[in-house]
Amino acid sequence: MFSNNRMDVRDWYEGRCPRSGQLLRLPRTTTAEAIACDLMQHLATDPAYSREGKMYGVLLVETPSGTQQVLKAFSGLLHGESLVAGWVPPIPGREQVILEETRTLEQLEALKQALIQLQSIPERQTYVALAQEFELRLRQLAQEHAQRRHDRQHLRQQTIALSVGEEPSLALAQLDDQSRRDGMERRQLKRQRDEALQPLRQTIEAADTRIQAIKQQRKALSRQLQTQMHAAYRLTNFAGESRSLPEVIAGGGLPTGTGDCCAPKLLHYAATHGLKPLALAEFWWGPPLGDKVQGRFYGACVERCQPIMGFLLSGLTPTLPSLTILYEDDWLLAVDKPAGLLSVPGRSLDHQDSVLSRLRYGRSEGLDLMPVHRLDQATSGILLLARDGQTYRQLSQQFQHRRVHKVYEAILDGTVVPDRGTIDLPLWSDPTDRPYQRVDRLRGKPSLTHFRVIARTAITTRLELTPVTGRTHQLRVHAAAPEGLGIPIVGDRLYGEGSGADRLYLHARGLRCRHPHSGEWVHLHATPPF
């Protein structure tokens, strides 16, 4: 049995249900990635896999009996074959047009050979050679004529200066006649050139016209075959619906290869065999292509998979990883936010997973919830939310007037010498380097943090951090800055090395505030997971 902790989500494969418009998601978890890495090790043992770059995928599924299995698939063909033992088969339908595909491919090959012949007709080389030859002769003749014209001008000037009576007129006429003969010689050479090149040009133009017609014919045949193949594919989702690709994506314009990627293969197979998908991981193996690098994980491709992902996931229960509830009443809700999860959704579609999103999906009153403060995505711990506007405003005033007592716990990547102390450093956000914060005594805003050493090891220090102000990244900068403790928090990839750590070792451990309605103190605690 595989471990599939819902908190180990690394990314999401998602799409909107075409009927309800609801966002449906399938996670890529560390468990799925570990299974995929095992598959990579297998692929690495056979050089044949490294010669052909393509996407591979693994899908962790649950059977009706509750056991877990792993499905694996490849995009397109593997070593020229679509059916390979041990791998998920292609989506049914292509075999229905196999004869038409064979016939069309033969036609396309014949058209390709015709194009090659038309592009390599001997008249093209003959035309180029003759054109170059005449161009050279014309340049040489132009140089000769230019020299003779210069000589004639000189002779005209001498003749006019030395002539007496009517003698100069005869001499000048002879020079004019020579000029006319030069012009006739140039025109004659150009006529010879045109007479030699014109038949060749006509032949080449006719071939080019034929090439364009063949290209249009080839394009139409390819489009016709692709349309037939798309119409033959029948995708099935977890709601039991079966649709052809053109029915799934109205308006046409389906890229070549739609339906042949590993994610649609895996999801279709799971849906048609009563298997519940738990996690999916896709990776590239083989020579690099574009931004694809061997061994790296990727989401659904934008062109082929993403447009059909919503349909394929339809029928799945839109569940999201659960959150630990620390406190709840009619006005307040406090959760223990895991590291790596946003407090609120981001702007882009791939940054929608957040505490607020999960609560809105999982709770009937979730749409009314409002986070009163924020935690960095990398930071875990207590996050407080209000259930109504009045509660939100009253709690926000407590935060603004610094009446909320917050305590964090962190592990620093080094030894902090003093047992306790205070860090008072102004922080400024450089608009050209966001979200990075830096110490700036001219432009920075005041920020104050108290610290106390909880424990030390030979290489780390566990601290209790009490921020008085609430600046962005305040604790991380106060720890890492040379003017502060000069020792970054373990796992801080922004202000420290961050290498080798599975997360940022910073946790919002405690929070104390006045209840906005009863006036009593609310004490919240979340034990650090490290």
Image (cartoon, rainbow, N blue to C red):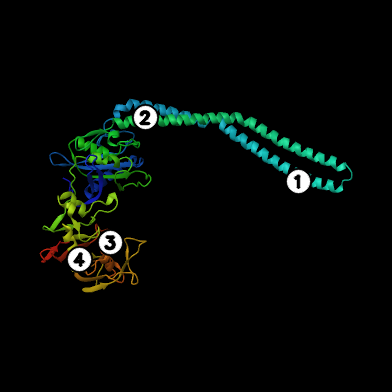
Residue at mark 4: 397
Residue type at mark 1 is His
**Mark 2 → mark 3, Cα distance in angstroms:** 54 Å
Q: Circle 1 is placed at which residue position?
A: 150
| SS of the residue under disc 1 | helix
Q: Earlier in the sequence, mark 1 or mark 2?
A: 1
**Three-letter code for the amino acid on which mark 2 is drawn:** Gln
Helix, strand or loop at label 4? It is: helix
Q: Is residue 359 visible?
A: no
Q: CA distance from mark 1 to mark 2?
A: 67 Å
Q: Residue at x 75, y 46 (%)?
A: 150
Q: Position of residue 181 (x, y in %)?
A: 75, 36
The type of residue carrying mark 4 is Gln
Q: Residues within 10 Å of mark 3 (few under 14, many from 20)?
A: many
- Which mark's residue is nearer the viewer, 4 or 3? 4
| Image: 277 above or below 342 | above
Q: Is residue 389 above or below residue 76?
A: below
In front: label 4 or label 2? 4
Q: What residue would you read off at disc 2? A: 224
Q: Name the residue rendered at 22%, 65% in the picture.
A: 411
